[in-house]
Structure formats: C-alpha cells, structure tokens
Amino acid sequence: MPNPRDLGLPFAGRTGPLNAITDLPGLEVGHVTLISGEGAHAVRTGVTAVLPCGKTGAHTVPAAWFSLNGNGEMTGTAWIDESGGLSGPIMLTNTHSVGVVRDAVVAWGKSHGWAEAWSLPVVAETYDGFLNDINGFHVTPEHVFEALDSASGGPVAQGNVGGGTGMIVAGFKGGIGTASRVLDGLPHTVGVLVQANFGAREDLTVLGVPVGREIPDLLPVREESAGRDGSIIIVVGTDAPLLPHQLRRLARRAALGLARTGSVAHNGSGDLFLAFSTAVPEVAGGLEHWRALPHTSLDPLFKAVVEATEEAIINALFAADTMTGLHGRTVHALPHGRTLEMMRRYGRGPDAD
C-alpha cells in the first residue's frame, strides 16, 4: 500500500532509505499478527518486537523514557531511570497481555544468552478491546518467541500488524507506523516506531488540515459498555552518541510530533515514550568510555523526532485497513481519496495550487 509520501503529501525533512526505524544500522523489528474468529471470539491482536542492535548486537544501550499521560503501562522503566540503560528488546502488545509477554521475554533471553540471573524486560501496551477479545488472553509465549526470532532489518510492515493489529486512531483504524529522518549537518539518523491507538475524531489533523472535522462519518458504533480506546507508545531510536539525560530530552519531543496530529493526551490515554541510542559506550580497563554530542548540537535531533513522530502516526493511519472484530464491530480505514482531495483543497496535498 502506498504511503503518504508516495501519494504526494509534503512531509518536512529528509528520510532514510526505508523511511523506517530500521534505517538505524543493525536494528531489527518483528511482528506476530493474530486474526481469527468472529463475534464474541474475535481475535484481533498481536505482538511487536524492537531489538535496538539486533539479535547479535549489544544487549544494553543508553536509554530514557517519558510519560506524557500515564494511563498505561511500560514495564522496566524504573531501572531505566536508575541505570540510564535499556537491556533487551522493546515489546509492544495489548493491555492484558503485558504479563505473558514480559515472562516470555525473560525465557527467550535466557535461552539466547541475553539474561542470566535476572531480567527486567520492557513491555508496553495499548488497549485493543473494542475489536479484540482482550480477556481471551490469546497472545502466548510462542508468539513472543516468534516475533523475536523473526525480527529483521529492512522494510517494516505497518498498519494492522503485530501489537497494532486491533488499534484505533481518532475513530479510524490505526496500528503500527514508522518513519525516519537523516539529520542535516550531522552524520546521524533518527527513527521512530509507534503503536497508535489514541484520539478523538474531531481533533485529527494531517499536516495542519482538520481531517477529522471534515470526515464526521465512518465512525465506529459504540455500545455504552464498549468504552473508548486510547493511548500511544512511541519508540525513538538514534545512532547519535547521547547520554541518558539527553535521550530523555529526545523522548519528550515525541509529544510535539503527537500534538501535530491533534492529540491532547486525554485523561484516559497512556502516552508513553522511550528513546535509546545504538552508540554504545566502549568498555576498556574496567571503565566505560562515553561519547556524547554537546547540548548545542541537539536541535537537529529534536526536530527529527518531532517530524518522524508525526509522519509515523500518519503512516499508521494510511497503512491500516478496515477491520471487523469483536461482536461484529467495524472500524473503517482512513479514506485515502477523500483525504487527498481535502489536502489539495487546503493547499497541502499533491498537485495543490
């Protein structure tokens, strides 16, 4: 499926070759997508794995995290705060599968030599219970192993895949999205991957155009008991050498990219962001030898995070397909033709006057 850039939407910034988080050398992404059944037994969920340095690279990288709104879960963050490091993969799944995914990562790490006496995996979630039988606990350890073992570089599947399978954005089908930026004036790359499941229709904005207000139809029909979906996980990676407190500054900037798409971080939303660097410090003579860009050089990275976050979210929307799930509920895909016509009308689309 063509992405928004291919369709002519004028996103700012220069992307890497793949326009994906896998533009970072060595980084690998794996998905397991679970789609089966219908009615009360509809399974529309999955799990996504992000390995910052791949399965054979460094196991621990500098990292930091940030909570814009905390109605969500990202395990392992207390140790990231304490140590300034991320050990192991980053896993994305649904809200009620965090425990099984966490335990499976420990087992996988032990079998692959990643974990010895203890492990504090990072597992983050968003809620897919509108489309998925979330209390059926359909994600198993085997699915987690498959996502990790199949992770690879190269193009990243987006939309209704992995942990994003059952997710919703502003009443349209959402899911996994990714984008990257090559920095101007610095030999480094920033990559972003999102699991997008947030927002109200009336707030949705694409490159400054009020798309949500212009498309008031195609809304999912919600029974009173169905609740409202919410939350986004944003993973930011870079190969720039940065210290943990600098990475926290990058993680915070993801909020600005999210805001460009219309989010106001609702009370019920879990907006949790993680940033890491693949520039691992060298160890010699019993010492870690760190390198870091000066603070005065960080502005291009801040801009790259904002731009790539915005584009990754819009990529998730454009990649997702209409889905019918739990109890026959349907969530429609963003209508490409109507959206592109609207973008042209506002002077922000292909062939705009």
Image (cartoon, rainbow, N blue to C red):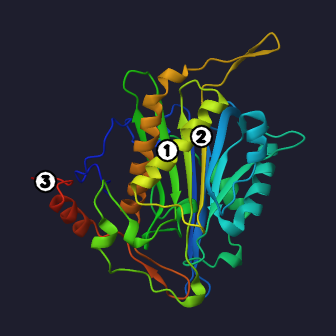
The x, y position of residue 266, in whole percent, is 54, 66
Q: Which mark is residue 220?
A: none
Considering only order in the chain, which callout, 2 or 1, is on the residue closer to the N terminus?
Answer: 1
When the figure is inspected, residue 183 is found, relative to residue 4, above or below; the finding is above
Task: Pick out the residue farthest to the left.
Answer: 353
Mark 1 residue type? Val
Residue 321 appears anywhere in the view: no
Dots 1, 2 in contact, CB < 8 A: no
Element class at badge 1: strand
Q: In which quarter of the image is residue 335?
A: bottom left
Q: Residue 192 carries which label?
A: 1
Name the foreground residue: 257 vs 100.
257
- Answer with the quarter of the image where residue 184 lies: top left
Residue bearing mark 2: 275
Taking the spot 31% from the left edge, 72% from the top edge, the residue there is 213
Percent coordinates x, y for residue 160 in the rendering: 48, 65
Q: Which marked residue is nearer to the observer: mark 3 or mark 1? A: 3
Q: In this view, does 84 lie to the left or right of 50?
A: right
Q: Residue 352 carries which label?
A: 3
Residue under the point 56% across and 33% down? 26
Which of the pair 203/9 is nearer the observer? Answer: 203
Mark 3 → mark 1, Cα distance in angstroms: 28 Å
Q: Where is residue 110 in the image (x, y as percent from the top left)?
A: 82, 44
